[in-house]
Image: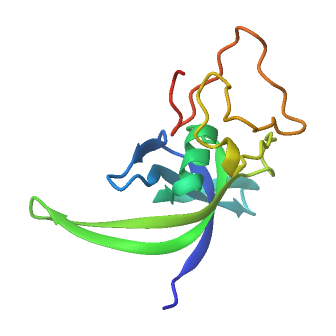
């Protein structure tokens, strides 16, 4: 069946909520704000015309990467399946726009970003930088200095 795929450019409006489902699938969620800006030729200024909010859902490896990479206020580009959800609570009718993300990235037209590739062999490592026997570090990625703790990455344990 055909799904509606869209690309939305905007800013991260809420902190990323990360959890693992009962079946063990990593899941991340955040709100994305996309504001239309228009140029007024008579006033010769740009003005905001309106903001749309989207709930972005990411699953599996994308969820882990989003949770460790995306912060409130950062400009991002999200591509995914678009759906309108309708619900009723307490006698009120609600409509929400949701994106099931297939990719999320920083908007490099508005800043810079440093990319670190995550290989399947490095997922699930402990937070202390240890790795499974036989794993090698990624080329070009510096090892943490002795005595310096690495930040916890969702899906990784905090200790040995």
Most foreground residue, 68 or 44 = 68
Where does the C terminus fall, quadrant-wise? top right
Q: Is residue 120 visible?
A: yes
- Left or right of residue 19, residue 66 in this image: right
Q: Quadrant of residue 62?
A: bottom right
119 relative position to 89: left or right: right
Pick the front one: 50 or 119: 119
Figure check: 144 above or below 124: above
Residue 11 place in picture, x, y as percent: 60, 48
The location of residue 111, given as percent across then percent down, is 79, 42
Number of marks in the image? 0
Q: Residue at x 56, y 27 (%)?
A: 152
Q: How is the image coloured?
A: rainbow
Query: Residue at horizontal 70%, vertical 12%?
Result: 148
User: Furthest-top residue in view?
Assistant: 147
Quarter where residue 68 is shown: top right
Q: Can see residue 53?
A: no
- Residue depicted at x 67% and y 51%: 120
The location of residue 42, given as percent across then percent down, is: 73, 62
- Extreme-bottom residue of the structure: 1
Question: 40 left or right of 137?
Answer: left
Residue drawn at (53%, 35%) of the image = 156
Percent from the top left, x then y, of residue 80? 57, 69
Using the image as rendered, state which of residue 101 and residue 14 is in the foreground.
101
Q: Residue furthest left?
A: 91
Q: As drawn, which residue projects farthest toward the right?
A: 140
């Amino acid at each position: 069946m055909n799904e509606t795929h869209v690309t939305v450019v905007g800013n991260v409006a809420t902190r990323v909520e990360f959890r693992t489902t009962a079946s063990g699938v990593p899941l991340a969620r955040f709100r994305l704000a996309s504001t239309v800006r228009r140029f007024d030729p008579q006033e010769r200024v740009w003005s905001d015309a309106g903001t749309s909010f989207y709930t972005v859902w990411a699953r599996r490896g994308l969820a882990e990467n989003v949770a460790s990479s995306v912060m409130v206020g950062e400009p991002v580009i999200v591509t995914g399946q678009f759906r309108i959800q309708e619900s009723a609570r307490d006698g009120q009718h609600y409509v929400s726009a949701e994106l099931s993300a297939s990719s999320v990235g920083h908007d490099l037209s508005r800043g810079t970003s440093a990319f670190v590739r995550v290989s399947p062999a490095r997922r699930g490592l402990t937070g202390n930088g240890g790795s499974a026997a036989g794993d090698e570090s990624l080329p070009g990625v510096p090892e943490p200095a002795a005595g310096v703790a690495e930040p916890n990455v969702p899906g990784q344990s905090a200790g040995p």
